[in-house]
Image: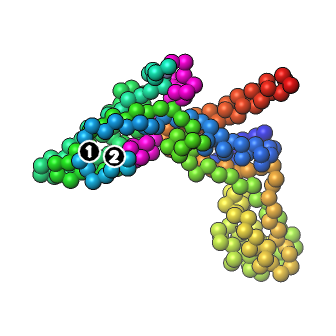
Amino acid sequence: MEIDVLELSDRSAKFILSNTTAAFANGLRRAMLADVPTLAIDDVNVYNNTSVLYDEQLALRLGLIPLVTSFDDFVPQDECTCEDGCPACVISLTLSVEATADEGRMVYSGDIVSSDPKVQPAEMNIPIIELKVNQKVVLEGVAHMGYGRDHAKWQAGVACGYKNLPIITIDGCDRCGACVNVCPRNILCLGDKFVEVSDESRLNCSLCGLCQDACEIDAISVTENESSFIFTMESDGSYTVNELIINAVNTIKRKASSMGDILSTL
Ligand code: SF4
Ligand code: SF4
Ligand SMILES: [Zn+2]
């Protein structure tokens, strides 16, 4: 298997995965969405809430705020060796905001105060609730690590998807231009002798096949490489995309190894 990184930042990545199977590509996608545990607020103790939001709605919004997570420092509570919660599986965060008598204010994720400096909201400007004059919210959020397969609040990977690498072949073109005009992604252009497509713009092909349909002499064909995939993914900020990919691959390795152990006992 080979990986060609096309774009990489802390929050997003685009890469080509080659010489592998659709099953593995999909396994990686699913692992990034469902099997890499993250921290999220799971229990909320509301001490005062005079805002217009129900406590339950407020708790849901708090749960969906991504928290920066250290994969090595925390464990899901049901996998922890403690019995009643410990700093490795339970993190307390507080939110105490009151609007003044003169002016309302928006409560943002940046108003959350964490008991552990390593655990902070991934973004400080996520709006939670707008307080009108004299309204307040005072609460404690208890964060646990959990899995995206149980609830979206624990899903670190977002917009993870892939498509087969497109193969565009041109043979016998008479430069009529029909395919150029119908391509919705404008990736074909008329060269001196025949229609052309660059390697870079080929990656944007959606495999829609409109160019093939428009060509009356079957000079262009679009197929997909069955063993190469263009992957795009984003992280919600709990991890960098590097950490997310590494954790996802390690999860697959652990699962494959435990499956091997089980099979070896049969
Ligand atoms: S398959 Fe669709 S997107 Fe790809 S080159 Fe043809 S018309 Fe354009
Ligand atoms: S439609 Fe066919 S013949 Fe016309 S430019 Fe495209 S590939 Fe060439
Ligand atoms: Zn614990």
In terms of depth relative to the viewer, which is nearer, 129 or 8?
Answer: 129
In terms of depth relative to the viewer, which is nearer, 12 or 27?
Answer: 27
- Whole-percent x, y for residue 154 in the image: 52, 40
- Whole-percent x, y for residue 136 in the image: 22, 44
- Whole-percent x, y for residue 43 in the image: 41, 36
Residue 68, magenta (yes or no):
yes
Is disc 2's CB within 8 Å of ligand 3? Answer: no
Element marked by disc 2: helix
User: Mark 1 and 2 residues: CB-CB less than 8 Å, in contact?
Assistant: yes
Q: How crowded is mark 2: few (under 14 residues within 10 Å), some or many (20 or more)?
A: some
Residues rendered magenta in the picture: 58-82
Q: Name the residue under label 2.
A: 55
Main secondary structure along the magenta-highlighted residues:
loop
Total tally of numbered discs in the picture: 2
Q: Mark 1 points at which residue?
A: 49
145 lies above or below 5: above
Q: In this view, does 131 lie to the left or right of 60?
A: left
Location of residue 19 by image quarter: top right
In space, the residues marked 1 and 2 are separated at their CA atoms by: 7 Å
Q: Is any part of residue 10 visible from this angle? A: no
Q: How crowded is mark 1: few (under 14 residues within 10 Å), some or many (20 or more)?
A: some
Is disc 1's CB within 8 Å of ligand 3? Answer: no
Residue at 44% x, 37% y is 42
Q: Is residue 10 left or right of residue 44?
A: right
Residue 256, which numbered label?
none
Residue type at numbered disc 1: Asn
Residue 232, magenta (yes or no):
no
In terms of depth relative to the viewer, which is nearer, 15 or 244?
Answer: 244
203 lies above or below 184: above
